[in-house]
Each structure stands twice: as structure tokens, then as C-alpha cells.
Image (cartoon, grey):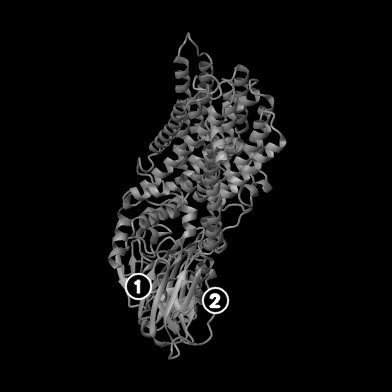
């Protein structure tokens, strides 16, 4: 008999339970958050994903500056819909709203584990749908019992890729869920079922995370092709081609439904700063074999670990004579083909949308894990493997272990776990095969305990080992605590948006502090960081990390005036990064009178940026405020001469170390500044060093690397009086009032305003502006900022109102495609029902009724 719905539900629940217990146990063993003091916020998890979930929390609770289209908090105003589509468009992400704001790290952890549990359940349901052997996926215990499907489903969700890489890239987990679901959609295409639900699932998968959904779609297509080629029914070629067309149509329709988000994400990527470029280099096969075993770790190798139970059962397939030969060979060939395709350059590019990723080059490994688990279930679905097949599966694992013997990835735990796992699997299979009236259910229970125990133990220990190794090899960030709360409180108290911006500070906790603690700062780190933002802020002296994708705040009174930063929070350096100093100050807030968000520049040609950030700031300000002295570097000291009591700023983008004005610590020296430049990966920001001494002699002590390659104009001395005069002029001639919405700005200007209105927002694609109610046109650019010409406005020759609106590129086109796709989907759901009702109505009409109607006529 076929498996019951109750048994299918029990199998899915078991797989989810095994997954949650294994991950939790592993994190507890490693004393990782939330079970211990060690942070789990490594790399982009702390730098991007937690901050973006915090921003989503603010949106859900109505506390964000900006909305879905426009993010006023980061990068002095950026598009937010591409970031939603990349980081938080998963339905699971909405669960963040159920947690308290200061529990954001716990929320992301729970969401991640729930995604893994969902992936396990989805794979379990798929396996039971694939089962068709003697037991047919029966609940009786013969030919693939439901609990075995649950264990294999959990082994997929607990694969090495999930517990070592995707666990700190939570949006990748959506691909882990998508693969078995898309394979189910392929099964529905074979049988002609769920013509409406299929496209909806495709749409959800692609909207949740298009990147891994693309890989999952490729994998599901391969599985569907295999199923059609191994179908033992006498299915005509024409019918099989019809299945492929039906599957392709379902996929395209689902992608079309997700088009409003996908189009925005795609065009957002086109506008982004280039970031890293890498060439693919395949891993050594010894490392590939090693990563299929437990308790191994490496960032640049494919983590295909499943647990030795899944590997042994997958290895039995080729030797299991109960499985038809064509099916045995096809699944084995698919496993080998997917594994080899990960190592070959051209197919590597196909898997990764024709671009080698910046980080791990094996992001498609979850597809290999899924195919291996499916192969294991196919072998099991025709009955418990016999001794010959079991010996063959054990031999496959032994060959992997021998092939990995020289790999440095092997640890002291690897081989003991392999041996115990193989022994547990062999024992479980032999016990399960002894079921019957004599022994009752005891052998099956013992077999289940052995398989579950082996899976949980191996997955938990591999998770714990990976937790420790990530902290040793990757940057890490502290979870929400006293520092972030103090910073958030200071920002909230100083906030005056939109009258002025509040900068959360130059001493960051993460690269996306404005998203986490509030304010409207320059810092922004995303796959969609606009090129115009990076280039504009770099021209003004800002720093970056991640090769330009992570733009940093700039602590400078001139740029604060240019971007209407009226309050700036100063934090002690983050002790989590070991940057504490005895002279670190407490939390302070500095305030300044700054122009409004919209200012007016006089008529004339637009200036052009040059090489000096000091002069570039002056061009955007419209006034000379710096003295640029001739500098000399002797040994570790930079010297210059400036007007007394000016403020000294150092621009050394390639220098890495510390700089101190006036000598060494303890001799009346100025503030020590830390610069972390290593161009192009890191660019050090312009730094304030203190006031020029009365004698005008500037001496900067440098300690670090790169002092010999400082720019010619590396020191600028700022005259505060000149700056105040320039700011007063911009304030008096700028907007008299500014109203900010979730997608635009409206500003009232002084009567007769002429020249160019400049909005203190980077001129990213999507801005359109108009004056005095005229039709909006694409906004212009003034040194990288949004600009609107004011000539010929109101009756007195000038403009009195500027209105600018933002709509991300691709939204209209994607919306049109999505709308058309929705109409097609609706037709697919409605038309068959209407036709069915008509047929039913016609059938219910009796012959006597027809004769009565004929006589009446």
C-alpha cells in the first residue's frame, strides 16, 4: 500500500526534530550563541544579515527612516528593494517581527534553524514521493519505511554545506529548501497535477533567494530528466517532451510571478560597485573526498558531508540488484556528473550564473547533497539492501576515507566518527532486514535508534567543530549588547531627521551600524552598494573595506555640512575587536549648525572632482576652507606648516597603522587615529588629528606600513571660521522647508531661487525630479549628488519648489511581467474549473429533458 498522509507527516516531523536537535547540540558543545559566550556572528552574518533583519524589524514595526523603496538610514540614502530581494525576502524573515528589538541575533538564529528544519521536511516529502519499489514507500517497514526517509531528509538538511557555510548565510538556506520543493514541482509536471501550486512554489523559491534558487532549479531539472529517462512505463517520446514543456512553462511562469523583485535585484547589481573579481581554481580531490566526511572544515572546498549513514546507503545503489539496472546506473551517473561539474571551470560558471563568486566557490554543493540523498533513498525504496550491496556501500565510504588520508582537512575526530557511523549503519540495515512476526517491531526500532543516533552525533560534532573553526578563520562581531544599546540610545536622543542627519559614528560595531542602531549615516555594506556612492565618498576622503562594497563613515565637519549631518555620535573603539585604548573617551555627541537636505548652488558650470579630497570637498561646498601645506616624511614622522589653531586632517588611503599629532603618547600629543588601508581591499578614511600648535608646526608620528607612499597632499588644515561662513551661505540660500517621505523629497526654496538645487543624496539610478509642479524628469548630477536645474521656474525667473521621487530601476517592467504572469496563473486555475462545471452540468441533463426542450421548441 502507498504511504499514508499520517506516516508522511510523522516522517517530516522526525526529520525536522533530528535537524533541530543536532544543530542545537552542536552549538551547545561549541558554547556558541545562544548557548554560550562565543558569538556566531562571523563575516557577513554580523556585518550584513543581522543588520538587514534589524532593518526589516523596524519596517514591520513602523520605526524605520524610509520604506521598502528608499532607505534613508544607509549610504546617505540608498535603494532598499534590491537589498530586500537579496537578504530578507524569505517568508521566514518575517518571523523577526515576533522577537524583541534587542533580541535580533536570537531571531536570526531561530529563523536559520527553522529553515534547516523546513529543508529536512521538504526533502523527506520528496523522498516519499520518489519511492516506488516493492515497498513503494510503504509504512510497513519494507522497502523504505517512513522513519528512514525522515533520517535521510535530516541528513540532507545537516549536510556539510549547511552546517559550515550556509549557517552564517541564512538566505542560502532558502535554496536548501527550494531544491526538494522544485523537484516536487517536477514530479507534478510528470503527473499533470498542481498546475497552480507549482508556479507559486517556483515564485516563492526565486523571490526568497534567486541565487540559490537558480542552482536548485538546475538541480531539479537534472532530476526530472533522469526520472523521465528511467521511467519504466511505456511512455511515448512525445509525452515526455510534453512533460518537459510543462515543467519549463511552470518554471517560467513562477519566475514571472517573482519578476517585480527579480528585475529590481538584477538591475541593482548592475549599478553596484564592482567589488572582488576571482578566478576559479578547483580543489584537490583529496580535499573533496575529505569534505564528504565528518568533522572537517575549509572555506574553499565543497562540504558534501551527509553523515556516513547517507553515504553508505547511497553507495549501495550501484550494487543493489533489487533496483533496475537502468535506474541504478542513471542515479550513479548523476551523482558523479554533479560532483565533477563542481570541479570543472565551464560547468562551475554555469552553476554560479556565469560569474565566480567572491567567497566560497562551491555554493551549489547542496544540490550534490540532495542528489546523494535521493540516490540513497532509491536504493532503500526497493527494499533494505542485501549483504552484497551493503558491502559495496561500505567499500565506497572506505575508498573516500582512503582517498582523503593525505588531506590536511582530516582531523582527529574524522576517522573515529566514520568507523562508528559505518558500523551503526550496517547494524541498522541488518537489523531492519530481520523484521517479521517472530521479532515484531524490535529490529526496526533498534535500527531507527542506530541510524538516528549516528546522524545526530556526527552532525552535532561537525557543527561544533565548524563553529570553532569559523571563529578562528573569519572576522566576527559581538551580538547585541550594552555597546549597541548605548549607541542606539545616543542616536535616538540626538535624532532630528529630516531637519538634519544623525551619524551613528566613525567607531563602528559593524559595517551597517545605521541599520542596527539607527540614524542616517554614510556607512553601507551590500552586494548592491552603488558605484556612484563609493566613488563620490572616496573622492571626498571616505574609506572602505570589501574592495569598495563596504563604505565607511567619514568624521569630517566639511562633509558633515555637505550631507546635513547635524549630530554625530562618538563611541569608544569596539573592545570586541581588541581596539580598546587607555585614552578612549566615553560616548559623546557633537552637534553643528548645518544646511538643510536641499541647498542651492549658483548658476555656472558644474565643477569636476580632482585627485585631492580636500579640494573636492571645497568644490562641493563652494568655498576654500583648507590650507594644503607641503609635507615631508622623514623616518616615521610627517611634518608640515599650517596656520595656528586650524584643525589637522590626514589623508593616507594606503597607510595601515596609527597616526598621532605632536609626538608620542604621554607627551601632550593629540588624538591617536587608527588607519587600516590596504588598497584596493581596504581604503583608510581621512582622519582628524587635532589642532595645529601655536607655532604652526605640524608633526605627525606614524607607526605602521605604507608611510613611504603617502599622497603629495596628505595633510589638510581646516579653518573653522571659513567653514562657518560657507555653511551660513548655504543655509540662507537653501531650502526653507524640507518634507521627506518613504520614496522622495519635497523642498520649498527661497523666492526667485536660480542655479541648481542639490539634494544631499547620492545620485543613484531611479531618481526623478521636477520644479513647481512641472513633469518630473530623470534627476541630474552635481558631483555625484542629486541635482535639479532651477532656471525658468516661477514668474520672477526662479523656482520655488522642488519635488524628487525615487523608484528603483526595473520595478515597472517587473511589475508588468508579474501582472501578466498572475493573469495567466489565474486563468490556469479558473478555466479548468469552469469547463469542469459545464461538463458536469451537461452530464446531469437527462435525455428526457433534452426531448422536452425539443418538443417545446
Q: Secondary structure at mark 1?
A: loop
Residue 374, compared with residue 81, is above or below; it is above
Residue 272 visible from this viewpoint: no
In the image, which is nearer the foreground, mark 1 or mark 2? Answer: 1
Judged left or right of residue 106, residue 829 is right
Label annotation for residue 673 = none
Disc 1 residue crowd, few under 14, some 14–19, many 20+, Cα 10 Å: many
Judged left or right of residue 752, residue 347 is right
C-alpha span from label 1 to label 2 = 29 Å
**Position in image of residue 635 (x %, y %):** 49, 70
Residue 20, compared with residue 804, is above or below; it is above
**Position in image of residue 630 (x %, y %):** 50, 81
Residue drawn at x 56%, y 33% is: 847
Q: Across the whole image, how many numbered discs are drawn on residues?
A: 2
- Taking depth in this image into account, of 164 and 124 the one nearest to the observer is 124
- Taking depth in this image into account, of 153 and 257 the one nearest to the observer is 257
**Position in image of residue 535 (x %, y %):** 53, 69
Q: Which circle's residue, 1 or 2, is located before the other in the chain?
A: 1
Disc 2 residue crowd, few under 14, some 14–19, many 20+, Cα 10 Å: few
- Taking depth in this image into account, of 147 and 607 the one nearest to the observer is 147
Q: Secondary structure at mark 2?
A: loop
Q: Residue furthest bottom?
A: 796
Judged left or right of residue 488, residue 157 is right
Image quadrant assignment for residue 453: top left
Label annotation for residue 500 = 1
- Taking depth in this image into account, of 510 and 732 the one nearest to the observer is 732
**Position in image of residue 358 (x %, y %):** 56, 53
Mark 2 lies on residue: 611
Q: Residue furthest right?
A: 237
Instruction: Quarter of the image for the C terminus: give it.
Output: top right
Amino acid at each position: 500500500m502507498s504511504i499514508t498522509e499520517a506516516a508522511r507527516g510523522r516522517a517530516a516531523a522526525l526529520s525536522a526534530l533530528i535537524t533541530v536537535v543536532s544543530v542545537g547540540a552542536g552549538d551547545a558543545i561549541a558554547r556558541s550563541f545562544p548557548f554560550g559566550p562565543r558569538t556566531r556572528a562571523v563575516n557577513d552574518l554580523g556585518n550584513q544579515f543581522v543588520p538587514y533583519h534589524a532593518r526589516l524589524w523596524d519596517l514591520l514595526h513602523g520605526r524605520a527612516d524610509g520604506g521598502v523603496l528608499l532607505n534613508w538610514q544607509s549610504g546617505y540614502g540608498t535603494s532598499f528593494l534590491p537589498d530586500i530581494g537579496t537578504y530578507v525576502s524569505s517568508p521566514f524573515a518575517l518571523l523577526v517581527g515576533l522577537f524583541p528589538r534587542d533580541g535580533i541575533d536570537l531571531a536570526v538564529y531561530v529563523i536559520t534553524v527553522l529553515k534547516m528544519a523546513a529543508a529536512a521536511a521538504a526533502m523527506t516529502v520528496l523522498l516519499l514521493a520518489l519511492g516506488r519499489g516493492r515497498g513503494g514507500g510503504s509504512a510497513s517497514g519494507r522497502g523504505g519505511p517512513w522513519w528512514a526517509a525522515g533520517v535521510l531528509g535530516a541528513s540532507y538538511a545537516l549536510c556539510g554545506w549547511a552546517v559550515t557555510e550556509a549557517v552564517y548565510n541564512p538566505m542560502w538556506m532558502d535554496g536548501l529548501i527550494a531544491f526538494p520543493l522544485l523537484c516536487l514541482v517536477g514530479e507534478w509536471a510528470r503527473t499533470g497535477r498542481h498546475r497552480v501550486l507549482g508556479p507559486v512554489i517556483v515564485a516563492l523559491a526565486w523571490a526568497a533567494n534567486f541565487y540559490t534558487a537558480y542552482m536548485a532549479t538546475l538541480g531539479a531539472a537534472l532530476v526530472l530528466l533522469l526520472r523521465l529517462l528511467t521511467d519504466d512505463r511505456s511512455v511515448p517520446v512525445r509525452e515526455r517532451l510534453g512533460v518537459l514543456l510543462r515543467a519549463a512553462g511552470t518554471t517560467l511562469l513562477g519566475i514571472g510571478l517573482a519578476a517585480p523583485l527579480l528585475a529590481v535585484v538584477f538591475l541593482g547589481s548592475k549599478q553596484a560597485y564592482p567589488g572582488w573579481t576571482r578566478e576559479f581554481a578547483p580543489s584537490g580531490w583529496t580535499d573533496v573526498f575529505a569534505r564528504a566526511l565528518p568533522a572537517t572544515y575549509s572555506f574553499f572546498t565543497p562540504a558534501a558531508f551527509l553523515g556516513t549513514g547517507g553515504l553508505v546507503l547511497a553507495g549501495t545503489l550501484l550494487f543493489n540488484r533489487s533496483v533496475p539496472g537502468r535506474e541504478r546506473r542513471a542515479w550513479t551517473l548523476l551523482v558523479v556528473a554533479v560532483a565533477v561539474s563542481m570541479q570543472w571551470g565551464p560547468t562551475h560558471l554555469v552553476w554560479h550564473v556565469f560569474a565566480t563568486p567572491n567567497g566560497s566557490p562551491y555554493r551549489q554543493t547542496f544540490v550534490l547533497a540532495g542528489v546523494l540523498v535521493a540516490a540513497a533513498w532509491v536504493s532503500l525504496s526497493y527494499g533494505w539492501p542485501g549483504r552484497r550491496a551493503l558491502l559495496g556501500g561500505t567499500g565506497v565510504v572506505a575508498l573516500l576515507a582512503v582517498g582523503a588520508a593525505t588531506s590536511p582537512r582530516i582531523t582527529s575526530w574524522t576517522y573515529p566518527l566514520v568507523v562508528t557511523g559505518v558500523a551503526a549503519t550496517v547494524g541498522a540495515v541488518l537489523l531492519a532486514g530481520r523484521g517479521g512476526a517472530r521479532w515484531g517491531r524490535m529490529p526496526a526500532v533498534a535500527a531507527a535508534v542506530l541510524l538516528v543516533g549516528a546522524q545526530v552525533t556526527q552532525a552535532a560534532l561537525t557543527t561544533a567543530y565548524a563553529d570553532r573553526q569559523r571563529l578562528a578563520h573569519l572576522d566576527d562581531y559581538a551580538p547585541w549588547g550594552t555597546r549597541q544599546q548605548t549607541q542606539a540610545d545616543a542616536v535616538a536622543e540626538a535624532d532630528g531627521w529630516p531637519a538634519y542627519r544623525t551619524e551613528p559614528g566613525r567607531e563602528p560595531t559593524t559595517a551597517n551600524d545605521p541599520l542596527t542602531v539607527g540614524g542616517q549615516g554614510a556607512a553601507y555594506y551590500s552586494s548592491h552598494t552603488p558605484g556612484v556612492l563609493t566613488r563620490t565618498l572616496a573622492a571626498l576622503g571616505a574609506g572602505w573595506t570589501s574592495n569598495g562594497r563596504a563604505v565607511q563613515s567619514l568624521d569630517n565637519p566639511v562633509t558633515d555640512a555637505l550631507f546635513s549631518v547635524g549630530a554625530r555620535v562618538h563611541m569608544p573603539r569596539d573592545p570586541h575587536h581588541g581596539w580598546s585604548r587607555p585614552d578612549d573617551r566615553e560616548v559623546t555627541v557633537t552637534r553643528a549648525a548645518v544646511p538643510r537636505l536641499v541647498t542651492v548652488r549658483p548658476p555656472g558650470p558644474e565643477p569636476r572632482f580632482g585627485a585631492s579630497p580636500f579640494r573636492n570637498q571645497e568644490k562641493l561646498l563652494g568655498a576654500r576652507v583648507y590650507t594644503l601645506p607641503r609635507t615631508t616624511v622623514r623616518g616615521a614622522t610627517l611634518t608640515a606648516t599650517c596656520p595656528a589653531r586650524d584643525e589637522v586632517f590626514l589623508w593616507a588611503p594606503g597607510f595601515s597603522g596609527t597616526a598621532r599629532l605632536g609626538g608620542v603618547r604621554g607627551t601632550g600629543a593629540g588624538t591617536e587615529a587608527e588607519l587600516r588601508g590596504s588598497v584596493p581591499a581596504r581604503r583608510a578614511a581621512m582622519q582628524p588629528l587635532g589642532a595645529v600648535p601655536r607655532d604652526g608646526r605640524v608633526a605627525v608620528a606614524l607607526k605602521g606600513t605604507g608611510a613611504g607612499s603617502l599622497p603629495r597632499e596628505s595633510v589638510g588644515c581646516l579653518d573653522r571660521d571659513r567653514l562657518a561662513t560657507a555653511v551660513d551661505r548655504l543655509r540662507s540660500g537653501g531650502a526653507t522647508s524640507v518634507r521627506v517621505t518613504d520614496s522622495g523629497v519635497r523642498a520649498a526654496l527661497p523666492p526667485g531661487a536660480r542655479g541648481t538645487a542639490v539634494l544631499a543624496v547620492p545620485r543613484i539610478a531611479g531618481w526623478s525630479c521636477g520644479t513647481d509642479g512641472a513633469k518630473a524628469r530623470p534627476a541630474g548630477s552635481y558631483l555625484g549628488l542629486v541635482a535639479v536645474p532651477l532656471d525658468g521656474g516661477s514668474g520672477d525667473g526662479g523656482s520655488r519648489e522642488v519635488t524628487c521621487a525615487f523608484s528603483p530601476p526595473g520595478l515597472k517592467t517587473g511589475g508588468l511581467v508579474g501582472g501578466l504572469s498572475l493573469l495567466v496563473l489565474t486563468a490556469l486555475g479558473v478555466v479548468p474549473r469552469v469547463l469542469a462545471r459545464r461538463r458536469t452540468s451537461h452530464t446531469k441533463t437527462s435525455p428526457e429533458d433534452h426531448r422536452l426542450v425539443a418538443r417545446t421548441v
